[in-house]
Amino acid sequence: MARRDPIYITIADEIRKEIISRPLPPHTRLPSEPELVQRYGAARETVRRALARLQDQGLVYSRQAVGSFVAEPRVEQDLDHLLGFTEFMVYQGLKPGSRVLTAQVQRISDPNSPVLRHLNLKPRSAVVYLRRIRLGAGTPLVIANTWLPERRFPGFLKHDVERHSVYEIMQQMGHRPIDAVQTIEAATLGEEDALLLTVPAGSAALLIKRIAYAGGIPVEYAVDYYRGDRTRFRVRLGVLEQTMIPG
């Protein structure tokens, strides 16, 4: 006999299909709990569990004493592969975009600068610095700060960094990253960054720092702020071999 899913999962799946297939615009109000109880012939607690499941999946949000609404779609990034933002957006079926805030060559004097440390550079070394707003389907999603060693990318800024992927340009110049070390932590947005991402000050964000390598040489240091309400990251995990676990 085939195993049947619990009723609340079935209800959640049906509502999910309705949201995606119609599709319902963000912030559309869903039927009320009593309406859903009547529609599916289920207990109110079952309907609440279905809505909670949809909320956990980032498909809906609730407002107390008002109801449940369709959420803004989240962009889900797979951390198993090193993709530039443009490639990532195309993979998601969204039109990528970029707005350049700063594009310049800098010389960094501070010997304690994380840029120099992570790119293995000496004080007064020149770096290419880009600060951009990254867009997905026209919506600001990321504030991207990128540093590249200028000696490996001379003339980098002659390229159109607003229309072309940084990784695409790096590949053309012979130093496309092939692996990276990346950290993710929670952050809150100050007024300036929140304004750039069109969210209220103090909104949640994901702070991502990345050191990318080409042939074992660090060629990119990045500090990016992703909107917490529109981004989700996914990674596939495996089990360590027993011999690797101390004890």
Image (cartoon, helix red, strand yellow):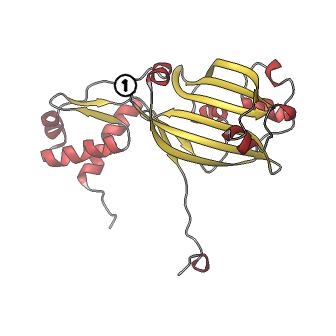
* Residue at 30% in and 44% down: 12
| 207 w.r.t. 4: above or below | above
Viewer-closest of 206 and 44: 206
Left or right relative to 176: residue 140: left
What type is the residue that disc 1 sits on? Pro
Q: How many marks?
A: 1
> Residue 119: where, in percent of width, then height?
75, 42
Is any part of residue 162 visible from this angle? Answer: no
Residue 29 drawn at (x, y percent): 26, 25
Query: Which residue is painted at 51% across and 34% down in the image?
Result: 226
Badge 1 is on which residue?
26
Q: Quadrant of the N terminus?
A: bottom left
Crowd around label 1: few <14 · some 14–19 · many ≥20 (10 Å): some
Above-or-below relation of 236 to 238: above
- Residue 199 is situated, as x and y percent measured from the top left of the image, at 41, 23
| Residue at screen point 75% across, 25% down | 106
